[in-house]
Image (tube, helix red, strand yellow):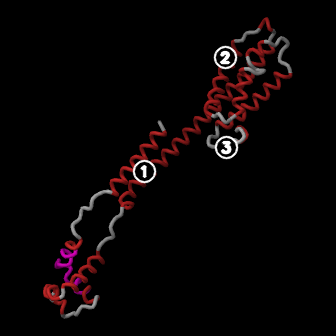
């Protein structure tokens, strides 16, 4: 799954819904019409009288609502507006309308991130295991190859192990250019003391230099393998100075 496409799709959906809600045209008539229809309904006759009295109107005058409205339109409008506003539900803003969608969207994004992270960890552990297996086989094959008398040497096992480890290291170097241990390990088996040319030129078995190179390579690859299995960490021991 393309993680970039997933994030971009979610962002576009969010912006689209937000814009549609923000610019949706109002679908209601003049609020004054609403007030009149509400206040003049039979069910609101007594609540309207109560509202008028609470605002200071004479109780006797508001007993006959049509007459009171004709005689004191301003007082009627004031009482009607107060009654209407008291019962009216607050308008739903854009965020209220978008909240269900946002809740679902953020839930989906959280699930996506968790799944992607788990996939990354799983892939890192698989890369670690593959690198450890390649390094172990290379170590055994290199020592066997270098220790065998020149006339009896068969490079098939060593060549296969060398190719497998080099393939792994090239991938690590490409994906983690700030890990010098991986680059140094690659150089050791390509042009260093554990390269095919260097080991092929030995006639008296591996010397101290080659043995130390094997141990240093093993130590470096252990650090690289451990880092592959723990993505997201700083891995200070593998980074160049001043590398972010």
| Element marked by disc 3 | loop
Q: Is residue 195 magenta?
A: no
Q: Which residues are magenta?
A: 35-50
Q: Nearer the viewer, residue 144 or 25?
A: 25
- Residue 210: which quarter of the image? top right
Density class for disc 3 (Cα within 10 Å; few <14, some 14-19, many ≥20) is few
- Residue 32: which quarter of the image? bottom left
Q: Is residue 3 above or below residue 185?
A: below
Q: What residue is disc 3 on?
A: 234
Q: What residue is disc 1 on?
A: 105
Instruction: In the displayed orientation, state which residue is furthest to the top.
Output: 151
| Element marked by disc 2 | helix
| Element marked by disc 1 | helix
**Marks 2/1: CA distance?**
50 Å
Q: What residue is disc 2 on?
A: 160
Residue 96, how many percent across, how many down?
A: 37, 61
**Sequence order check, earlier mark of 3 and 1:** 1
Q: Is residue 53 above or below residue 205?
A: below
| Dot 3 and dot 1 residues touching (CB under 8 Å) | no
């Amino acid at each position: 799954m393309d993680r970039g496409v997933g994030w971009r799709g979610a962002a576009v959906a969010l912006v689209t819904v937000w814009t549609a809600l923000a610019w949706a045209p109002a679908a209601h008539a003049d609020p004054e019409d609403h007030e009149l229809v509400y206040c003049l309904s039979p069910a609101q006759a007594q609540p309207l009288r109560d509202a008028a009295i609470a605002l200071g109107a004479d109780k006797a005058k508001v007993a006959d609502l049509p007459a009171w409205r004709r005689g004191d339109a301003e007082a009627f409008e004031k009482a009607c507006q107060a009654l209407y506003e008291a019962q009216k539900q607050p308008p739903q803003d854009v965020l209220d309308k978008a909240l269900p969608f946002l809740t679902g969207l953020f839930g989906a994004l959280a699930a996506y991130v968790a799944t992607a992270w788990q996939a990354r960890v799983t892939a890192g552990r698989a890369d670690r295991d593959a690198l450890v297996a390649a390094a172990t086989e290379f170590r055994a094959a290199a020592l066997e190859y270098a220790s065998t008398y020149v006339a009896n040497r068969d490079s098939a096992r060593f060549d296969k192990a060398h190719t497998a480890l080099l393939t792994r290291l090239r991938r690590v170097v490409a994906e983690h250019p700030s890990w010098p241990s991986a680059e140094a390990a690659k150089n050791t088996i390509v042009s260093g003391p554990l390269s095919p040319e260097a080991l092929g030129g030995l006639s008296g078995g591996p010397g101290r230099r080659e043995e130390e190179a094997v141990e240093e390579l093993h130590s470096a690859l252990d650090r690289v393998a451990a880092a592959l299995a723990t993505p997201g960490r700083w891995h200070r021991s593998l980074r160049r100075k001043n590398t972010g």
